[in-house]
Image: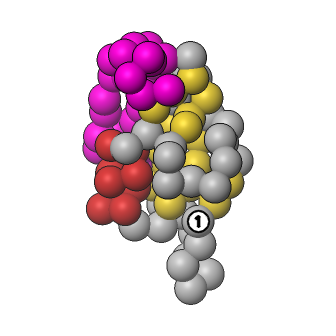
């Protein structure tokens, strides 16, 4: 699991999926979850994220409470999105 840190704060928002996460703005493909320190950043990153293979769901979860604050389905238009 990768973690983005900001001034030693713990990541309070988890981008997660039941499939591998891939984002063109990340240096490499990641696992199935990533911790992020900021709600807005987590949602923005999740919105740009796809799953591999396509067809999975991407969620942002507030880690301390388990509340899902953002959710999207990967539409499986794999030919266009790679």
Which residue is rendered at x = 59% and y = 72% of the image?
A: 5
Apparent side of residue 56 relative to residue 30 in the rendered image (left or right):
left
User: x%, y% of residue 75?
Assistant: 33, 17
Pick the front one: 52 or 36: 52
Residue 56 in sight: yes
Mark 1, residues whose alpha carbon is within 10 Å: few (<14), some, or many (≥20)? few
Which residue is rendered at x = 44% and y = 17% of the image?
A: 79
Which residue is rendered at x = 38% and y = 23% of the image?
A: 80
Q: Give the number of marks.
A: 1
Is 15 placed above or below 54 here? below
Is 78 placed above or below 17 here? above
Which residue is rendered at x = 40% and y = 35% of the image?
A: 59
Q: Which residue is mark 1?
A: 4
Pick the front one: 50 or 68: 50
Extreme residue in the front direction = 80
User: x%, y% of residue 52?
Assistant: 57, 23
Span colored in magenta? 54-82
SS at mark 1? loop
Q: Is residue 78 magenta?
A: yes
Q: Is residue 12 magenta?
A: no
Pick the front one: 80 or 44: 80
User: x%, y% of residue 60?
Assistant: 39, 43
Q: Quadrant of residue 67?
A: top left
Apparent side of residue 12 relative to residue 42 in the rendered image (left or right):
right
User: x%, y% of residue 54?
Assistant: 48, 17
């Amino acid at each position: 699991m990768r973690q983005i840190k900001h001034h030693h704060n713990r990541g309070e928002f988890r981008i997660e999926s039941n499939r591998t996460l891939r984002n063109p703005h990340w240096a490499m493909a990641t696992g199935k979850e990533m911790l992020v320190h900021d709600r807005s950043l987590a949602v923005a990153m999740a919105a740009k994220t796809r799953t591999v293979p396509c067809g999975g769901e991407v969620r942002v979860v507030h880690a301390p409470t388990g509340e899902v604050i953002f959710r999207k389905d990967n539409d499986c238009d794999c030919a266009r999105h790679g």
